Amino acid sequence: QFIIHYFLQLIPLLYFHGKKSMDKIALITGATAGIGKDTAFSLAKMKYNLILTGRRKERLLEVGTKLKHQFGIKSHIAYFDIQSQEAVMQFIDKLPKEWRAIDVLVNNAGLALGRSPIHEGEFGDWDTMIDTNVKGLLYITKPVSQWMVERKKGHIINLASIAGTQVYPTGNIYCATKHAVIALTKAMRIDLLPYGIKVTSISPGVVDTEFSIVRYKGDVEKAKSVYEGYTPLYGEDIANVIAFAVSQPPHVNINDIELTCITQASTHYYRKT
């Protein structure tokens, strides 16, 4: 009887210990809007606890609150500019230990600025795109991948673009940064192979988010004109694809996914109604 009583007392402890060990954590950069925000909701549905990063504090807090109420998950909010190596390192140093067992890193933060031919481009725009799309991705990936290497477990998802395999007029530097993301994804996959870490690139075509508003520096009308005459992809479409990649069995890695709306064949060819 004593043994039976002891075993019955032990069952709840075993249950809760097991439950705690199954907690999943994902870090999403650029989670304030668009693809990053929609990815947060997709992963929250899968019961991931989320580290949400971005530059706009109020938006991050709003997203975190909604996720908690809707899905009951935990969120850790960190607002900083991923272009700053110092800011990223401060975030990493201050991240509580219980949040460092990151299962999924979604490198979503990225942007395009301007549509000028190479001889008319602005150095400031170029620096911002390179510092965000390439260097920012590297700043966050290095420490997080180190934690993954220690655990021999993890999944890195890099948001690339069809501009990472194609080039279009006046897309020069943006296309170059996304080509770099594709190359870095392949390199990461090789470097992290011995540690069982998955690496995936997601390359969308035209997506209706704040992307064009940022590219055209707040010119909303010009941004809207980009999507006239056809139905583009939306942030939730990309989030669904990310969730698909994340949900694969442990032995399956989705290397690269490229997707467009039905009316886009490439960066050059559209079918407008």
Image: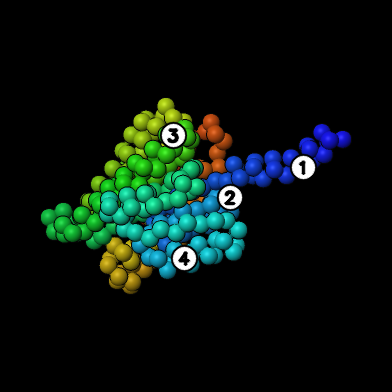
- Residue behind mark 3: 150
Residue name at image x 54 percent, y 56 percent: 74
Of badges 4 and 2, nearer the viewer stands 4
Of badges 2 and 1, nearer the viewer stands 1
In the image, 100: left or right of 219? right
- Residue behind mark 1: 9
Q: Which mark is residue 229?
A: none
From the top left corner, tell me how far across and down residue 57 is, in percent: 40, 66
Residue 249 in view (yes/no)? yes
Is disc 4 placed on a helix, strand or loop?
A: helix
CA–CA distance in space, label 4 to label 1: 40 Å
Figure label count:
4
Q: Which mark is residue 61?
A: 4
Label 3: few (<14), some (14–19) or many (≥20) C-alpha neighbours in 10 Å: few
Q: Earlier in the sequence, mark 1 or mark 3?
A: 1
Residue 229: image quadrant is: bottom left
Of badges 2 and 3, nearer the viewer stands 3
- Residue behind mark 2: 46
In the image, 94: left or right of 4? left
Using the image, determine if residue 3 lies above or below residue 50: above
Using the image, determine if residue 193 lies above or below residue 80: above
